[in-house]
Image: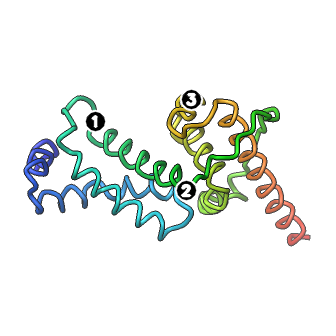
């Protein structure tokens, strides 16, 4: 069954089509969930919740643009809404240091390690980092999405980069000491 027909069948609440759509898109959408979640279990919960919303709102998809892109936005918005209700973004700071450059030695720092340390970031830093760096949203867009100021978005991004840089440098220095 092609994607357009699957979407049409899902709009008619066809559970077999919903299952097929889930199987088709869940790997890509799970990678979105893992970026925005604290851990694997939370990512699984976010994926399930997100798909429920996708199926409930699928009639709003008007076949303009990519369905996968639309589903990704629904998934991200669902996750961000959970964080907004938890009050993650209540502390506002307009003070942000200069941009921190993080250089990564690809032989030393694996993708698994980077994913792990990004997931360990406090929620407000992790979400802004992912939206800005990994999904290319502007600070203005992030401010609207998270209901924060642009300055807070910039501050949170800078703090996230600083924390990541410190963890990468710590790992590199430990590996250098072990090699001696």
- In the rendered image, residue 31, in percent from the top left (x then y), is placed at 44, 55
**Labelled pair 2, 1 in contact (Cβ < 8 Å):** no
Q: Nearer the viewer, residue 165 or 172?
A: 165
Observer-nearest residue: 16 or 175? 16
Q: Mark 2 or 3, which is nearer the eye?
A: 2
First along the sequence among labels 2 and 1: 1
Q: In the image, residue 53 lies at what x, y percent?
A: 29, 52
At 11% from the left and 62% from the top, the residue drawn is: 16
**Tag 2 residue:** 86
Quadrant placement of the C terminus: bottom right
Q: Is label 2 in a helix, a strand or a loop?
A: loop
In the rendered image, residue 177, in percent from the top left (x then y), is placed at 90, 68
Which residue corresponds to the image point at 60% horizontal and 30% vertical from the top-left?
139
The answer to whether the residues at label 2 and label 3 have Cβ atoms under 8 Å apart is no
Q: What's the distance in space between the residues labelled 3 and 1, CA to CA? A: 21 Å
Q: Which of 114/39 is in front?
A: 39
Q: Which residue is at a point 31% across and 45% down the rendered structure image?
A: 71
Q: Is residue 7 left or right of residue 76?
A: left
Indicate whether 149 appears above or below 167: above
Residue denoted by label 3? 138
Characterize the local packing of mark 1: few (<14), some (14-19) or many (20 or more) Cα atoms within 10 angstroms.
Answer: few
Q: Identify the colour scheme used.
A: rainbow
Left or right of 118 on screen, residue 59: left
Q: Residues within 10 Å of mark 2 (few under 14, many from 20)?
A: few
Q: In the rendering, which numbered label is found on residue 66?
A: 1
The secondary element bearing badge 3 is classed as loop
Distance Cα–Cα, label 2 vs label 3: 23 Å
Please tell me whether mark 1 sits on a helix, a strand or a loop: loop
Q: Indicate which label's residue lies in the foreground, 3 or 1.
A: 3
Against 164, is 38 above or below?
below
């Amino acid at each position: 069954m092609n994607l357009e027909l699957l979407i049409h069948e899902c709009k008619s609440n066809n559970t077999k089509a919903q299952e097929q759509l889930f199987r088709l898109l869940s790997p890509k959408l799970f990678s979105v969930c893992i970026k925005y979640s604290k851990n694997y279990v939370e990512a699984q919960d976010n994926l399930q919740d997100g798909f429920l919303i996708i199926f409930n709102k699928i009639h709003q998809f008007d076949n303009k643009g990519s369905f996968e892109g639309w589903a990704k936005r629904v998934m991200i918005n669902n996750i961000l809404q959970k964080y907004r209700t938890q009050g993650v973004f209540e502390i506002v700071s307009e003070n942000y240091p200069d941009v921190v450059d993080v250089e990564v030695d690809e032989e030393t720092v694996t993708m698994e390690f980077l994913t792990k340390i990004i997931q360990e970031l406090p929620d407000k830093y992790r979400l802004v980092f992912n939206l800005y760096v990994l999904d290319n949203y502007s600070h203005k867009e992030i401010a609207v999405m998270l209901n924060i100021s642009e300055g807070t978005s910039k501050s949170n991004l800078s703090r996230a980069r600083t924390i990541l840089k410190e963890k990468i440098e710590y790992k590199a220095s430990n590996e250098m000491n072990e090699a001696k």
